[in-house]
Image (spheres, rainbow, N blue to C red):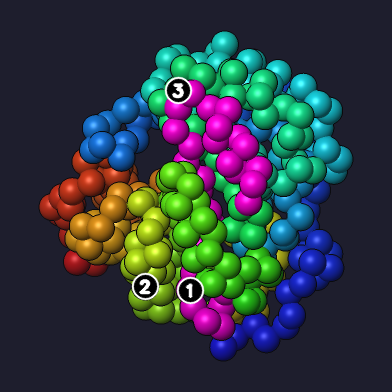
Amino acid sequence: MAGAENWNDAAILAVRPPKNRVDPRRPYAYLVEPECSASGVIEDVATIFLTNRECPFRCLMCDLWKNTTDERVPVGAIPEQIDFALAELPPAKHVKLYNSGNFFDRQAIPREDYEAIANRVASFETVIVENHPRLCGDDCLRFRDLLAGKLEIALGLETIHPEVLPRLNKQMTVEDFQRAVRFLTENEIATRAFILLRPPFLNEAEGVEWALRSIEFAFDVGVQCCSVIPTRDGNGAMEQLHGDGAFTPPTFRSLETVLAEGLAMCRGRVFVDLWDAERFFDCQRCGTARRDRLQRMNLTQKVLPMVSCTCEATG
């Protein structure tokens, strides 16, 4: 397997570009977009990208640290960020509070703010946060009990490949993930999984195979929804791996294949991440139409006919 070097915290930090400047009292982004809900209905979801302290788990492929602070934000700053975003956004039924790391990392989201946060999102039917499987414990239950709506926690599974997962520096095993899902499910907290398409150290065919295996595993252990993320460069380490021949971004065709086969499992919702999808286009003539097809598949959770084009990429 290519790229035998040990990518630990020190090695990953050594090749990072600088962080972006952020305001600890403002979210670094916010938006509303449609999503197919657990009930199968297309409903608007508000996503607030909270500014907070950097995640302590420095995963090899991650670039979310670019919009984080070095220190914990002051008590009251997170509710202020939510107030700011909700004042700017149109109404929505569900809300994602994504914080570039782990909601239940006490150095990221102060526990003292839980009640104030819950009050801000009381009108939403579902509150979705992201968290590391090893940080799922009593704080999840405490926050759940403060909410008017239902809590859902998104967990990074990434891949179940037995050699690749340990090399991502995620400091987690598949057993950790399974334990977290079991704990949350037993406590009536819904779960979704983030899964990487073609992480480092895999070729294109292996990337597709292991993404699908990872989706199957996630559903097997009780996850209700899987979100597939094409692995990107842009954090320093991935560029170095690319130069060493240990990483190549996935093709758009692979993204199409994984979504279609994931939906065909009929075991739960499957989405593909289409943010900056243009960078994965393998044909400029049909790329936009193919991206739009995947967006419709995300929303309908149905496999739609392939886009017709003279290029080889559409088969």
Could you tell me which residue is drawn at 67 percent across and 86 percent down? 4
Could you tell me which residue is drawn at 66 percent across and 54 percent down? 135
Element type at mark 3: loop
Which residue bears the numbered disc 1?
160
Question: With 218 as the anchor, is 145 left or right in this view?
Answer: right
The answer to whether residue 100 is visible is: no
Q: Earlier in the sequence, mark 2 or mark 3?
A: 3
Image quadrant where one finds the C terminus: bottom left
Between residue 24 and residue 97, name the one nearer to us: 97
Q: Characterize the local packing of mark 1: few (<14), some (14-19) or many (20 or more) Cα atoms within 10 angstroms.
A: many
| Range shown magenta | 137-165
Image quadrant where one finds the N terminus: bottom right
Residue 125: image quadrant is top left
Task: Kindly identify which numbered label has been placed on residue 124.
Answer: 3
Task: Kindly identify which numbered label has been placed on residue 213.
Answer: 2
- Tell me where residue 57 appears, x and y as whole percent: 72, 59
- Image marks 2 and 1: residues in contact by CB distance under 8 Å: yes
- Asked if 220 appears above or below 44 in the picture, the reply is below
Q: Earlier in the sequence, mark 1 or mark 3?
A: 3
Q: Earlier in the sequence, mark 2 or mark 1?
A: 1
- Asked if 80 appears above or below 209 in the picture, the reply is above
User: Which amino acid type corresponds to the residue marked 3 in the rendered image?
Assistant: Phe
- Tell me where residue 244 appears, x and y as whole percent: 65, 79
- Image marks 2 and 3: residues in contact by CB distance under 8 Å: no
